[in-house]
Amino acid sequence: PILEYQMSGELPQLRGNRHPRMAPHQIYPCLSEDTWVAIAVNTREEWQALCAAISKPEMANDSRFCDTTARLAHLDELDEMISQWTCRHTNIEATEMLQAVGVAATPAFSISEAYHNPHDIHRRTTINVETPDISPDLLTYGIPWRLGATPGSVRRLGQTLGHDNRAFLKEMLGFHETELDHLADGQVLY
């Protein structure tokens, strides 16, 4: 969009999930409420595979959809036809069926689904951190990218709430141990 603006001097129009040179390129509703699958088709082979996967092979040669230019001109119709198919499947089912035939597709995960997704866990976006304050069954959000030479890691979590209160109050503000004990007993200090 920046280069488009720089070259033409005109602000690009909002497209949402649509792409100026790919069709379909959208998220589509699935069987369960508020679940979605993202689908992107770039080549003729991908288009033909999508048509076969959704049991509409005739769409591959339909003049409204036979090439990218035609599909871009009939996006609303195209999206409706694909949505009729995706609505009969879960986002996982639709993804697996489309990926199996070479179509780029992925579930549009909720935060909960992404957090517990086996691929996400395998890539160590979510990790387990050994700490006495947190159950080892709980996952912690880790580092979502990996660098070959400096992969990075989370070795420990930050200190618990109030961890340094006693030391700070004693060393910096001059409180005595008896005062700190009194504040702790009154649950003023953690």
Image (cartoon, grey):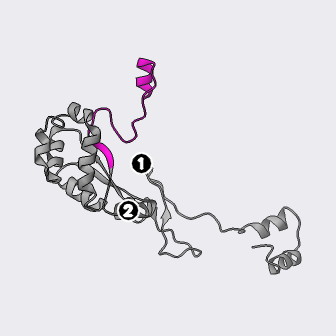
Q: Which of marks 2 and 1 is in front?
A: 2
Spatial CA distance of label 2 from label 1 is 43 Å
Residue 97 position by quadrant: bottom left
> Is the stretch drawn in magenta largely helix, strand or loop?
loop
Q: Quadrant of the N terminus?
A: top left
Secondary element at tag 2: loop
Work out whether mark 2 precedes mark 1 in sequence or the reverse, and give the earlier one. 2
Q: Is residue 104 something one can see in this rendering? A: no
The residue under label 1 is which amino acid type? Ala
On whether residue 21 falls in the magenta region, the answer is: yes
Query: Is residue 14 covered in magenta?
Result: yes
**x%, y% of residue 56?**
14, 49
Q: Can residue 79 be seen in this view?
A: yes
**Which residue shows up at 21% across the image and 53% down it?**
98
Count residues near mark 1 (Cα–Cα under 10 Å), then give few for <14, some for 14-19, many for 20+: few
Front residue of 119/132: it is 119
The residue to which callout 1 is attached is 149
At a point 25% along the width and 42% down the height, the residue shown is: 77
84 vs 143, nearest the viewer: 84
Residue at the outermost top position: 8
> Viewed as shown, does residue 83 lie left or right of 2?
left
Q: Where is residue 23 in the image (x, y as percent from the top left)?
A: 26, 39
Point out the stretch of residues depicted in magenta.
1-27
Q: In which quarter of the image is residue 33?
A: bottom left
In the rendered image, residue 78, in percent from the top left (x then y), is placed at: 24, 43
The C terminus lies in which quarter of the figure? bottom right
Q: Quadrant of residue 115?
A: bottom left
Q: Is residue 133 left or right of residue 63?
A: right
* Residue at x 41% of width, y 60% of height: 114
Residue drawn at (45%, 21%) of the image? 10
Residue 51 is left or right of residue 94, and the answer is: left
Q: What amino acid is at disc 2? A: Glu
